[in-house]
Amino acid sequence: MRRLLNLAIIGLAIVIAGNIINCSGGSNDSAPNVSGSSSTVQPISCDSGTVQIDQVLEIDAEGQGPAIFATGNCNVVINSPGGVSLTNCPNCIRVLDNSSIEINANSSILIDSTVDAIWAQGNATVMLQANEKISITSTGEDGIDVENDSLVTLNAPDCIIRSFDLPIDKSGNGVVDTTGCTNSDFESVPQT
């Protein structure tokens, strides 16, 4: 259980600061809920049910995969009384199928990726809401990549996207809604 948190139909194990918290998953069970102070958490991966985390959150994926991965019919909800930091990940947020990832931060959301920072496919949704800023950086590809009928929504006073390729790459009916950003600064910054 070194790298991923796996949510299966029969259960969920969440690793926080070296401790294991077992939570039930599945659509008929109560939502797993993790609360506490700031912690560096191992990457989150789930395929059904709901994962809820109520704390300041830092995930360093150590270059091994997504910081948060949701597929199937999984819902990940993060409510941070401070900030959220997702770093050192090829795709920091990866969401597929009918899954959703919602991150609410009282301060900022910082995403630092080596490939697509946010990659959404299928009917998946991602909603990022921060009271200060959302900063998305991709040193290898796109800031946000939406495909099929997926939706990514950004809400913050300041929304910043810096990417090697496109800040926002849309295909199919994919949508990126930035109308909730008071100030937007999106820029492609290829490495030289």
Image (spheres, rainbow, N blue to C red):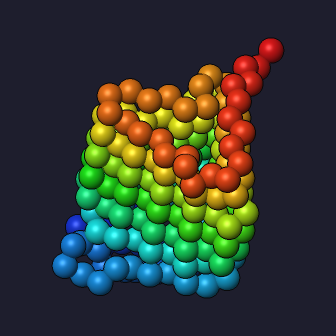
The quarter of the image holding the C terminus is top right
Residue name at image x 37 percent, y 57 percent: 100
Residue name at image x 59 percent, y 25 percent: 166
**In terms of image quadrants, where is residue 18?**
bottom right
Residue name at image x 67 percent, y 53 percent: 182
The percent coordinates of residue 23 (x first, y second) are 37, 80
**In terms of image quadrants, where is residue 12?**
bottom left
Q: Nearer the viewer, residue 148 or 41?
A: 148
Residue 75 visible in the displayed image = yes
Q: Is residue 189 left or right of residue 176?
A: right
The percent coordinates of residue 44 (x first, y second) are 48, 60
The percent coordinates of residue 96 (x first, y second) are 33, 45
Residue name at image x 32 percent, y 28 percent: 172
User: Does 124 sit above or below residue 187?
Assistant: below
Residue 5 visible in the displayed image = no
Residue, far left? 28
Label count reads 0
Q: Is residue 64 left or right of residue 60?
A: left
The percent coordinates of residue 179 (x first, y second) are 55, 49
